[in-house]
């Protein structure tokens, strides 16, 4: 259930970011024909017409800069990623059908 909740939260965050980008473009970058200016200029919030590079710089400046990576964790022992031994029949996800012994049956 937690995985489904996390996927839903990520999808809502993605949607919210998309709406924020679209509203920023609509209000600050797009000059409307009826207003002859952007809605932000008409409301007195901004005096300049911005472009999409301005939005990209805002997003890039908001994200934290990646720092140096820490040391990798060293492998211990000789354990491999893939185990080659087979699991017992009861532990397998898809157990194989058991072979039946037909030696007791009459074949007459």
Image: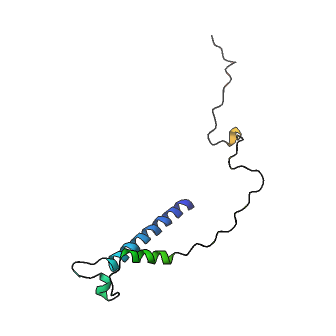
Q: Is 57 on the left or on the right of 37, as rendered?
A: right
Q: Is residue 106 above or below residue 21?
A: above
Q: Is 59 on the left or on the right of 2, as rendered?
A: left
Total marks placed: 0
Q: Is 83 on the left or on the right of 58, as rendered?
A: right
| Residue 86 found in image quarter | top right
- Colour mode of the rendering: rainbow
Q: Quadrant of the N terminus?
A: bottom right
The outermost residue toward the bottom is: 44
Identified at 32% across, 89% down, the residue is 44
Q: Nearer the viewer, residue 98 or 69?
A: 69
Identified at 76% across, 50% down, the residue is 78
The outermost residue toward the top is: 108
Rendered location of residue 24, percent (x, y): 37, 77
Rendered location of residue 14, percent (x, y): 45, 67
The outermost residue toward the left is: 34
Is any part of residue 70 visible from this angle?
yes
Q: Quadrant of the C terminus?
A: top right
Q: Is 51 on the left or on the right of 63, as rendered?
A: left
| Residue 103 found in image quarter | top right
Q: Nearer the viewer, residue 70 or 108?
A: 70
Rendered location of residue 56, percent (x, y): 43, 74
Identified at 50% across, 77% down, the residue is 62
Identified at 70% across, 66% down, the residue is 71
Is any part of residue 1 visible from this angle?
no
Rendered location of residue 10, percent (x, y): 49, 65
| Residue 29 found in image quarter | bottom left
Q: Is residue 32 above or below residue 47?
A: above
Q: Nearer the viewer, residue 22 or 97?
A: 22
């Amino acid at each position: 259930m937690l995985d489904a909740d996390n996927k839903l939260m990520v999808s809502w965050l993605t949607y919210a970011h998309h709406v924020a980008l679209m509203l920023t473009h609509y209000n600050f970058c797009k000059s409307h024909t009826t207003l002859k200016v952007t809605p932000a200029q008409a409301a007195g919030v901004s005096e300049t017409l911005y472009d999409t590079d301005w939005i990209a710089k805002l997003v890039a400046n908001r994200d934290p800069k990646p720092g140096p990576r820490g040391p990798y964790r060293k492998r211990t022992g000789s354990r491999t990623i893939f185990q080659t031994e087979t699991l017992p029949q009861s532990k397998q996800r898809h157990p194989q059908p058991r072979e039946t012994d037909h030696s007791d049956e009459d074949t007459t």
